[in-house]
Image (cartoon, rainbow, N blue to C red):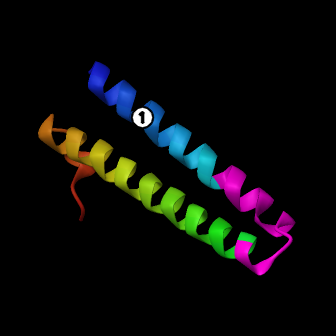
């Protein structure tokens, strides 16, 4: 179960990073900065989804039926 806790912590960290980037995206001064910020936001978004899938996969492998898509 320690793996699950570690993965949940990674998910929370990734989510917090995504929210922080989203909050500061309007402070970019140039088009280049905005483009780089959008790239970082997309990376953070994809990491949040990846971490969620890892957690769901662990739940499924441990026999927790709520991880199955209905």
The one nearer the camera, 18 or 39, is: 39
> Is residue 34 left or right of 29 when viewed as pictured?
left
Which quadrant of the figure contains the N terminus?
Answer: top left
Quarter of the image for residue 23 reads bottom right
Asked if residue 11 lies in the magenta stretch, the reply is no
Secondary structure of the residue carrying tag 1 is: helix
**What residue is shown at x 23% (from left), y 40% (from top)?**
59
**What residue is shown at x 38% (from left), y 25% (from top)?**
5
Main secondary-structure element of the magenta-colored stretch:
helix
- Residue receiving disc 1: 8
Quarter of the image for residue 46 reads bottom left
Extreme residue in the top direction: 2
Which quadrant of the figure contains the C terminus?
Answer: bottom left
Residue 39 point in image, percent of width and height = 57, 69
> Is residue 1 left or right of 16 when viewed as pictured?
left
Residue 55 point in image, percent of width and height = 31, 42
Is the residue 8 above or below the residue 39 in the image?
A: above
Q: Which residues are magenta?
A: 19-32
């Amino acid at each position: 179960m320690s793996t699950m806790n570690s993965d949940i912590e990674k998910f929370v960290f990734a989510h917090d990073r995504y929210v922080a980037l989203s909050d500061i995206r309007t402070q970019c001064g140039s088009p280049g900065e905005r483009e780089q910020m959008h790239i970082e936001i997309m990376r953070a978004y994809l990491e949040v989804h990846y971490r969620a899938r890892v957690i769901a996969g662990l739940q499924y492998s441990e026999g927790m039926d709520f991880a199955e898509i209905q």
